[in-house]
Image (cartoon, rainbow, N blue to C red):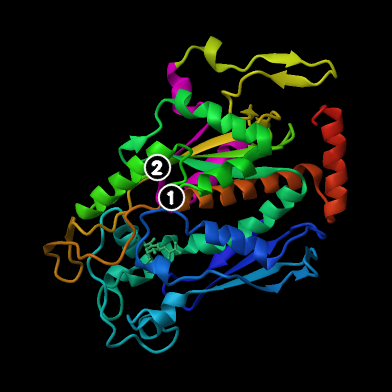
Amino acid sequence: IRYLTAGESHGPALVGIVEGMPAGVPVTAADLDEHLSRRWLGFGRGGRAKIERDKVSVLSGLRFSHTMGSPIALHLANAAFEKDRAGWPEVMAAGGTGEGVDGITMPRPGHADLAGAQKYGFDRAPHGPDVRPVIDRSSARETAMRVACCSVARQMLRALGIEVGSHVLRIGEVGMDDPGLWREGRDALLASGGARALYEAADASETRMLDADLTERTIAHIKEAKAAGDTLGGVYEVIVTGVPPGLGSYVHWDRRLDGRLAQAILSIQAQKAAEVGDGWAAGRTPGSEVHDPISRDARGAYRRESNHAGGVEGGVSNGMPIVVRGAMKPIPTLIRPLASVDLETGEAQPTRYERSDVTSVPAASTVAEATVAWTIAEALVERYGGDTFEDLRQRLDADRERFGME
Ligand code: EPS
């Protein structure tokens, strides 16, 4: 299965194509909209959050609330295109010559601006340098269409009893560093309702954190950062429950599930690190405390008492929940100026402020749910194949029986 997105942040729309989904997967536009609205959760978003509504239009591929096996084409309008008074229809016009449109000549440190302009030649565009094309496609606005596309796969997982959820562990300096403080609460949620219970509990917090006291302290920290003209990054965790053993493979580098999960995280704008299971901590812990002992229950099913591996051993899912964490850098558009150089004059000059978010870690955590869901769905379709959802489900059920999964 694969998907493509197109669209600029301040162009008229985002579009996406999802290809290769089996026929017969139950999906509606409302299912996709639910995850799109979750992407706007979280304290610390800026002015654009008040403008966008993000309701998807399904142009093809679904009939009577099910996939048909044909490509699924999705459309999301950018409300900012019309509603902003920035003249986007002129600035982003597909035709004409662009004469009279001011170029953006100040690359912002931390954005794709300078490297992107050098790559595509916008540092010497027809009417002088203009990094606008880089800004607009590298923007995390694109994640709206990614969430829509990946949510199709996510609905397939849901119909198979596989759920994906996330919660935020840290924003800036405030975080849940001691896993002893939150692991029990998280595991109780997972035991009661799988990863869906986890994301629903996180959604109830303005920072998507499981601890109420920490949510309060984090909101205060975000307010301080905003007052100081600064921005904040953070760390979040994505968990997948209901995954059978056997997804991914150890036989070749690009089939390893853990490598593919890391790509799912690092493919998201502004993410700088990904870890599976104990991740970095495994590098400083002795083997006797890292590896998850194997046992067998009365029914003959293999069990693990712990999950330091994060559900993946040798690049193959082992039947335990998949655990992946991501780290996001602070948003590089700051009120406080950063040192840069004007591409027009070559002179040193501080950056100019544009509208931005103080933090979007809660949003990133929901986008990571989507991209991780896609990776799991892709590995599932590889293993069980199927032009029809029913065939895939029957093969998965047979495996679950074999492995003694309830
Ligand atoms: C973004 C900058 C902001 C965010 C945007 C991502 O947009 P603007 O430049 O129009 O203020 O609001 O996020 C979204 C639009 C979104 O849908 O999440 C950026 O530069 O990445």
Q: Tell me: residue 258, above or below residue 115.
A: above
Horizontally, residue 311 falls left or right of residue 41, namely: right
Q: Residues within 10 Å of mark 2 (few under 14, many from 20)?
A: many
Task: Tell me residue 405's x, y (percent).
Answer: 79, 30
Front residue of this view, candidates 346 and 204:
204
For the residue with label 1, is its CB less than 8 Å from the closest atom of ligand 1? no
Q: Residues within 10 Å of mark 1 (few under 14, many from 20)?
A: some
Residue at numbered disc 1: 206
Q: Tell me: residue 384, above or below residue 10.
A: above
Residue 83: quarter of image: bottom left
Magenta region includes residue 276: yes
Give the number of marks. Answer: 2
Residue at numbered disc 2: 215
CB within 8 Å, label 1 to label 2: yes
The residue most toward the bottom is 96
Residue type (three-letter) at the residue carrying disc 1: Glu
Q: Secondary structure at mark 1?
A: loop
Q: Residue at x 33, y 40 (%)?
A: 217
Q: Residue at x 63, y 26 (%)?
A: 313
Magenta region includes residue 297: no
Residue 380: quarter of image: top right
Task: Tell me residue 91's x, y (percent).
Answer: 35, 81
Looking at the rendering, the quadrant in which ligand 1 lies is bottom left
Of the 4 image quadrants, the one containing the N terminus is bottom right
Q: CA distance from mark 1 to mark 2?
A: 7 Å
The residue most toward the top is 288
What segment carries the magenta color? 257-284
Residue 311: quarter of image: top right
Front residue of this view, candidates 399 and 366:
366
Q: Secondary structure at mark 2?
A: helix
Residue type (three-letter) at the residue carrying disc 2: Thr
Q: Tell me: residue 230, above or below residue 134.
A: above
